[in-house]
Amino acid sequence: MEGRPSRIFIAVKLSRDLRDRLGYLQCRLFAGRTDVRVVSVENLHITLRFLGEVEKERIGNVISACEQTAAIFSRFYIDVRGVGSFPAGNPRILWAGITDGSDTLIEINARLEYLLGKEGFTPDEKPYRPHLTIGRVKPSQGIADLRRCIAAMSDIEIGGQSVDGISLMSSRLGREAPVYTEIAWRPLLN
C-alpha cells in the first residue's frame, strides 16, 4: 500500500557498548519479573520527538527538519545515570536518566518542535524530558517491590557515549516487540 502512513519518531541511536550496559542493568532490575515488558536491547534509543502516523508524502518534511536541526548542533556527550519511572509513585514507564547532555537534547527537541510546527505538525503537549525507556509496567501486585528496586538504583552509573547524529526511525508494531527501521540519519557538526 503506497499511501499508507508510517509510524515514525526522531531519535538518538545508542552505541553497542551503552546498549549492552543497559541490557545488563535490565537483567539486574527485572530478573524474574513478569509484570514488566522489557524494551529489547536492540530497540533502546533516546526519543527526541515521537510523531506517530505520518503520511508518506510528509516524511520529506520531517527529514528536512532533522537536517536543519543537525546543521546547527555540534557533537556532544551524554552520560546515562540512575533509574526512575513515570509517574514516580505508580510506575508505568521505567527509564534510565540522562545527566550530561540533557540540556543539549532539550535544545534539539525545541528546534525540532519549531521546525515541525512550521510544517503543520501538532506540537507535543508534554514538556520534553530526556530519558531512555527500559521497560513498561503491566498492572500487578508487585509495585511496592518494584519501587524499592528503582529507589535502590536511582543513582547508579550506567555509562555514556558521544552523540554524532540524529535518526528518523519508522516503527512497525509486532507481536513480541516493535521493529524499528532507520529512514534517515543526519550528522551533527564536528
Image (tube, rainbow, N blue to C red):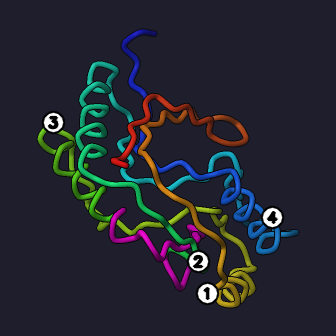
Residue 104 figure quarter: bottom left
Q: Amino acid at mark 3?
A: Glu
Going by the numbered disc 1, the residue's amino acid type is Asp
Q: Are marks 1 and 2 in contact (CB under 8 Å)?
A: yes
Residue 81: image tag: 2
Give the residue at x 85% y 69%: 31
Q: Nearer the viewer, mark 3 or mark 2?
A: 2
In the picture of the structure, the residue carrying the numbered disc 4 is: 34
Work out whether mark 1 precedes mark 2 in sequence or the reverse, and give the earlier one.
2
Which residue is denoted by mark 3 in the rendering? Answer: 119
Q: Mark 2 falls on what kind of element?
A: strand
Asked which secondary structure carries label 1, the reply is loop
Q: Which residue is mark 1?
A: 155
Magenta-colored span: 87-105
User: Dot 2, crowdedness within 10 Å: few (<14), some or many (≥20)?
Assistant: many
Q: Is residue 96 magenta?
A: yes
Q: Please, which residue is most extreme toward the left here?
A: 118
Q: Nearer the viewer, residue 80 or 150?
A: 80
Q: Are marks 1 and 4 in contact (CB under 8 Å)?
A: no
Point out residue 169 in the picture as x, y percentages from the top left corner: 47, 36
Asked if the stretch drawn in magenta spans residue 72, the answer is no
Residue type (three-letter) at the residue carrying disc 2: Arg
Q: Earlier in the sequence, mark 3 or mark 1?
A: 3
Q: Earlier in the sequence, mark 3 or mark 4?
A: 4
For image coordinates 36% across by 13% down, the residue present is 3
